[in-house]
Amino acid sequence: MFYHPFYKKVKSSIETRKTSLCIGLDPDIDRLPDHIDKSLKGLQRFLFDIIDVTHDICIAYKPNISFFESLGIDGLRLLEKVRKRIPDNLPVIIDGKRGDIGNTSMMQARYIFDYFGADATTLHPYMGLDSLHPFFSYKDRFNFVLALTSNHSAVDIEKKVLCDDQPLYMHVASLCSEWNKTYSNIGLVAGATQKELSRIRNVNKDLIFLIPGIGTQGGSYKEAVETGRNSENIAVINVSRSILYCSKELDYLIKVRKKTETYIY
Amino acid sequence: MFYHPFYKKVKSSIETRKTSLCIGLDPDIDRLPDHIDKSLKGLQRFLFDIIDVTHDICIAYKPNISFFESLGIDGLRLLEKVRKRIPDNLPVIIDGKRGDIGNTSMMQARYIFDYFGADATTLHPYMGLDSLHPFFSYKDRFNFVLALTSNHSAVDIEKKVLCDDQPLYMHVASLCSEWNKTYSNIGLVAGATQKELSRIRNVNKDLIFLIPGIGTQGGSYKEAVETGRNSENIAVINVSRSILYCSKELDYLIKVRKKTETYIY
């Protein structure tokens, strides 16, 4: 895994830029700064500007494909353009939360990896290994499997306790740790409290975590870095709304830049 | 739930047509009949013809959005056209397997329900109720939550036994049964063996099941109907590949029609 192209890109950026910040691109027309046209054109201008003023002080971008999809086919055309705007040295994690039976997952992987050219994606573990295998088979791409998410309803299923006394998310983390011995391109989505994050980290010191829930959702960046980083001090901490929509004023790009700088160690 | 527009449409078709067959639309250019152009145009002709020769002897269509997505934006334009080709009396289940944190699920629901106009969809339960709520909130649409799927790797997570001795899929079925008291628009994806199907049915006699795994995947239609139907004899049994790709010959539409007729009781 330490030799995977996604991992190497992320590691290099973390070490030179002194940040673990991944910027989540969740385009929402209703939250655009006041002076920007509430249209797809306005949204494109906004996202391009966000990328242009942050790409030298973050380590990755995570476009949330559902936000683009909600705008229909024109929204997906925008995603194509946004993907091209992101400089080559920064990996693009298309947050798709996919997973289905094998022949369908293969189609999903083509969409995310081949069509949009994502370097990495996110996956639902519910259907098990054969539903994830088509993604894992893309050796030069990376996959973050949902272990524990940062929403309240994680208690409904993710935190249910199995008969061997461990919560389901710990079982998922163990499975991914095992699978990664074969595939070397698996990480975990691991959010929520520090206690839980540290518990998941104990399963495997090397797996890379994509950590959501910072900013608007209330988690602390500093604690997430400290608890979530792997044996080589690598973690991918995602912040979306609290950077993108930190201001509606004319000088919003100055504020976006300043906000992004606060994530430098 | 018995008064839900999706449920009423399905029930009416089952009663008049004497079949529980939902045809899954998984467009695959590589599997088109020999004489059809291996292009998007060819695929459109094929799907339109399939709909035209089957719509009076099935109860619903289930376009698998991932197959359309794998063809990129042009594939999604095809899905728009396919959706319009399906007659109004037949509900369209867009098989999307979505689910994410609330604000993202809201975007997913807009895409599936508003943009594509699906009557129903399929959802991953892993992240719990607040990840599903935006879908459930569309009162006139219907949602099939994954309980037990028909793939081998269902053992990895879905069949894991919880500390109260029930497998996870039974817990998901119980949750959905409970949630449905509030929302009245929830069913289950329930595949695999008859023993398991009957176990899930025991959780709730009324919930409607979408049952995959028939045909290519090896399940028996007759047994699925008998075990999977609810208190009003309603079940949605999906067959995709073994109808769509039953012949590559010039007379493939005759064979598709004949194959479809075998699902009439």
Image: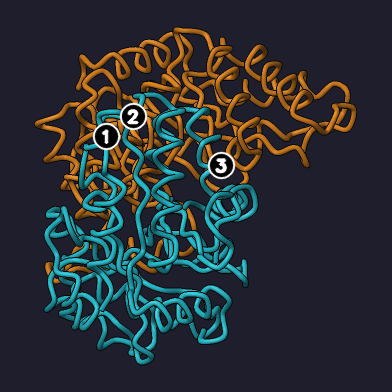
Chain colours: A cyan, B orange
Pointer 3: what residue? A81
**In the rendered structure, which amino acid carries the disc numbered 1?**
Pro
The image shows residue A163 at horizontal and vertical percentages of 18, 76
The image shows residue B22 at horizontal and vertical percentages of 50, 27
**Residues behind callouts 1 and 2 on a single chain:** yes
The one of B14 and B27 positioned closer to us in this rendering: B27
Measuring 33% from the left and 63% from the top, which residue is drawn there? A146
Neighbourhood count class around disc 3 (C-alpha, 10 Å): few under 14, some 14–19, many 20 upward: some
Task: Tell me the distance, in whole angstroms, between the alpha carbons under discs 1 and 2.
Answer: 6 Å
Query: Which quadrant of the figure has residue B27?
Result: top right
Dot 3 falls on which chain?
Answer: A
For residue B122, side relative to residue B150 (left or right): left
Question: Does residue B101 lie above or below B62 as drawn?
Answer: below
Question: Does residue B32 lie above or below A204 as drawn?
Answer: above
Of labels 3 and 1, the one closer to you: 1
Of labels 3 and 2, the one closer to you: 2
Measuring 41% from the left and 84% from the top, which residue is drawn there? A15
Pointer 1: what residue? A33
The one of B123 and A43 positioned closer to us in this rendering: A43
Task: Tell me the distance, in whole angstroms, between the alpha carbons under discs 3 and 1.
Answer: 21 Å
For residue B86, side relative to residue A187 (left or right): right
**In the rendered structure, which amino acid carries the disc numbered 3?**
Lys
The image shows residue B242 at horizontal and vertical percentages of 66, 37
The one of A164 and B227 positioned closer to us in this rendering: A164
Pointer 2: what residue? A36
Dot 2 falls on which chain?
Answer: A
Dot 2: element = loop
Neighbourhood count class around disc 1 (C-alpha, 10 Å): few under 14, some 14–19, many 20 upward: many
**In the rendered structure, which amino acid carries the disc numbered 2?**
Ile
For residue A228, side relative to residue B43 (left or right): left
